[in-house]
């Protein structure tokens, strides 16, 4: 009888120990309140980059200067720093809630070196958060742009399918059967440039 009692006691103690260990593991793995802020910040940074990259920079609403394309194009490729900051404040600054702070960085070498083009940290002129107190989260997007003399013509000298020609028996090209020599239009060929843009949200 004593052996049965001791065995039962050991079994109960072992079960209670397992319950205690699994309870500690469970409660330690439950996300803290910062998890929701982290998710919100990630979605916010991603949505801001996507919206600025797909919204045309209309001169009537935004001050885009000489850069054509999306709002993100104007923010990245503008040479006028004051115009660049004003555009960021009236586009990104209006989307990001004031309780969050943010800074935008640009890299031309796949993220090895970053250049900060705007930041609300220690910025008394901006109403957004100016210091990191809880967390930071980032999102990135690739910005592809090109500049050239030949961009928005009705006909392409390279006989792309978008040009307007009389020939109907050529599927890939249009116009004359003989393609034009690209060397003759070397100065008109747009020079592509790819930059990585990172938006960091903090609170």
Image (cartoon, grey):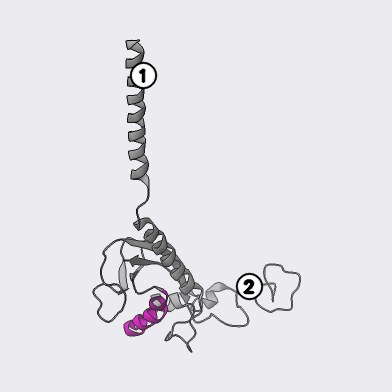
Residue mark closest to the camera, 2 vs 1: 1
Is 190 on the left-hand or right-hand side of 96? Answer: right
Residue at x 49%, y 85% (from the top left corner): 58
Q: Secondary structure at mark 1?
A: helix
Q: Position of residue 148 (x, y in %)?
A: 48, 79
Label placed on residue 8: 1
Closer-to-camera residue (172/63): 63
First of labels 2, 1 by sequence position:
1
Label placed on residue 160: 2
Chief secondary structure of the magenta portion: helix
Magenta extent: 79-95
**Residues marked 2 and 1 touching at CB (< 8 Å):** no
Q: Position of residue 35 (x, y in %)?
A: 37, 56
Looking at the rendered structure, the number of numbered marks drawn on it comes to 2
Q: Is residue 79 visible?
A: no
Quadrant where the image shows the C terminus:
bottom left
């Amino acid at each position: 009888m004593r052996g049965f009692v001791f065995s039962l006691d050991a079994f109960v103690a072992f079960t209670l120990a397992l319950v205690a260990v699994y309870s500690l593991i469970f409660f330690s793995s439950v996300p803290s309140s910062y998890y929701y802020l982290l998710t919100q910040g990630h979605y916010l940074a991603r949505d801001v980059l996507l919206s600025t990259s797909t919204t045309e920079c209309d001169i009537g609403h935004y001050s885009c200067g000489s850069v054509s394309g999306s709002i993100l194009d104007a923010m990245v490729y503008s040479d006028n720093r004051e115009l660049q900051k004003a555009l960021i404040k009236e586009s990104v600054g209006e989307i990001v809630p004031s309780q969050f702070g943010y800074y935008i960085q640009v890299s031309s070498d796949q993220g090895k070196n970053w250049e900060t083009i705007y930041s609300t940290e220690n910025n008394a002129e901006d109403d957004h958060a100016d210091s990191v107190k809880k967390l930071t989260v980032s999102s990135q997007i690739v910005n592809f742009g090109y500049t050239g003399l030949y961009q928005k013509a009705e006909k392409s000298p390279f006989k792309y399918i978008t040009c307007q020609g009389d020939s109907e028996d050529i599927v890939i090209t249009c116009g004359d059967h003989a393609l034009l020599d690209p060397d003759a239009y070397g100065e008109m060929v747009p020079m592509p440039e790819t930059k990585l843009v990172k938006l960091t949200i903090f609170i």
